[in-house]
Image: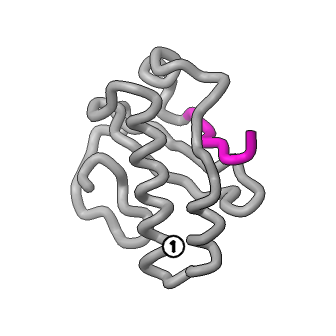
């Protein structure tokens, strides 16, 4: 996936920071998990959630966290309190939250 920054390994490519935003889990179980997403490759809030969830799932699978994967699969993920426009026009230092507990 070239539209998320790999947090597990060193990211070898240079990238333009102004096109990336940080998304963090708002979750009792996954709090603190972060993914940087290239906002030039998204069209909806659901696109962001899909990329975030895919990355979280991949980390859990790569580390064989089977119990956490079961919990992960029970959750519904979404972004609230922000619009796509807010995210696209925000500063690249801003952090947005992907919630799983509403």
Residue 77 horizontal/vertical position (percent): 58, 44
Q: Quadrant of residue 94?
A: top right
Give the structural element (helix, strand or loop) at label 1. Answer: helix
Above or below: residue 42 compared with residue 98? above
Please state which of residues 35 and 99 is positioned toward the viewer in this rendering.
99
In the picture provided, is 92 more to the left or to the right than 25? Answer: left
In the picture provided, is 74 more to the left or to the right than 47? Answer: right
Q: Quadrant of residue 29?
A: bottom right
Q: State the residue at coordinates (33%, 31%).
A: 42
Magenta-colored stretch includes residue 98: yes
Q: State the residue at coordinates (60%, 71%).
A: 70
**Magenta region: which residues?**
94-102
Q: On the image, numbered disc 1 is attached to which residue?
A: 60
Above or below: residue 94 compared with residue 71? above
Residue 99 horizontal/vertical position (percent): 66, 42
Dividing the image into 4 quarters, which one contains the N terminus?
bottom left
Please state which of residues 88 and 65 is positioned toward the viewer in this rendering.
65
In the picture provided, is 58 more to the left or to the right than 80? Answer: left
In the picture provided, is 16 more to the left or to the right than 32? Answer: left
Above or below: residue 89 compared with residue 11? above
For label 1, count other residues whose C-alpha is less than 10 Å away and answer few (under 14), some (14-19) or many (20+). some
Please state which of residues 33 and 70 is positioned toward the viewer in this rendering.
70
């Amino acid at each position: 996936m070239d539209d998320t920054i790999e947090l597990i390994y060193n990211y070898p490519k240079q990238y333009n920071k102004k096109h990336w935003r940080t998304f963090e889990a708002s979750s009792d179980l996954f709090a603190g998990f972060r993914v940087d997403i290239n906002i030039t490759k998204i069209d909806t809030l659901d696109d962001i959630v899909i990329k975030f969830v895919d990355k979280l799932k991949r980390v859990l699978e790569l580390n064989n966290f089977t119990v956490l994967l079961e919990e992960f699969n029970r959750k519904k993920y979404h972004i609230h309190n922000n619009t796509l426009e807010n995210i696209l026009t925000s500063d690249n230092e801003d952090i947005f939250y992907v919630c799983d507990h509403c």
